[in-house]
Image (cartoon, rainbow, N blue to C red):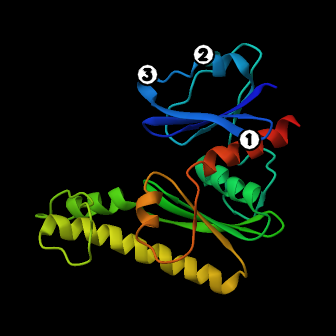
Amino acid sequence: MGIKLTLDIGNTRVKWGAFSEGLLQDKGTGHLANFELPGDILAQTTHAIISATGSYKLPFDFFPGEVKPILLSADLDLPVKSDYQTPETIGSDRIAAYHGAAALYSGNTLSIDIGTCITYDLVEKGRVHRGGMISPGLKMRLRAMNEFTYALPLAEIPPNAAPLALSTSDALGQGALFGAAREVEGIIGYFRDRFKGIIILLTGGDAGLLAENIHTEVVLEPDLVLIGLHEILTHHVN
């Protein structure tokens, strides 16, 4: 069996997944500047799909000649239909994430991608994307407090964060972390009150950190975007 290759291209990094017989068999990450796939993975690739959220896109000659990768966009025929009124503006990473949630669970799902921004996307039972929301991610909150004030430093999230900080730098970091955590908890509660049995999935670079600091049941799925890309690719090649 050949490999269905999924590529999630961000602003500085690439995450890839190799699927065979419906399962994620191998995965990896790399920097855009010097990204290379393992030769054995590339040699076995029969189909590929790319989600590119940054300005960079891999050249098509990166792939073997017979492989014509699909570039994910809202213009594609997608297995999960969407009510979004401006589909041309929705990021391909959001599209992939909510498709991943729908691939894993047949009921109501809320996919939360915690990266540069925090994105929330609801897929209702019956595989219809009802929309979502976007708020600042952790690093964006920290950067905003630095850039929009005169004296506040550019802080980081401190290790072993606690609500009461004893320095300004830690206060900024802990405020960003606990503020985002309470936001996520509140939004999860809102959807749980309205959609019976909804499954909440967290993904993205800061998902693990947020999961440690919220007090509600969630599914931590680091490969949600790759799983969604595979779902879309399979829809097109089968």
Amino acid type at mark 3: Asn
Q: Is residue 74 above or below residue 127?
A: above
Pair 1/2: label in front: 1
Residue 39 got which mark?
Answer: 2
Which is more N-terminal, label 2 or label 1? 1
Q: Where is residue 8 in the image (x, y as percent from the top left)?
A: 57, 39
Res. 169 image quadrant: bottom left
Can residue 139 be seen here?
yes
Helix, strand or loop at mark 3: helix
- How many other residues sit within 10 Å of disc 3, few (<14), some (14-19) or many (≥20)? few
Label 1–label 3 contact, CB within 8 A = no
Residue found at x 43% / y 22%: 34
Q: In x, y percent, where is residue 106?
A: 80, 64
According to the picture, the residue beneath numbered tag 3 turns out to be: 34
Q: Nearer the viewer, mark 1 or mark 3?
A: 1
Which residue has dot 1 on it? Answer: 23
**Residue 167, position in %: x, y?**
11, 69
**Mark nearer the N terminus (2 vs 3):** 3
Q: Residue at the spot x=56%, y=74% of the render?
A: 217
Number of numbered discs on residues: 3
Q: Residue furthest bottom?
A: 193
Mark 2–mark 3 Cα distance, whole angstroms, equals 15 Å
Above or below for 203 versus 44: below
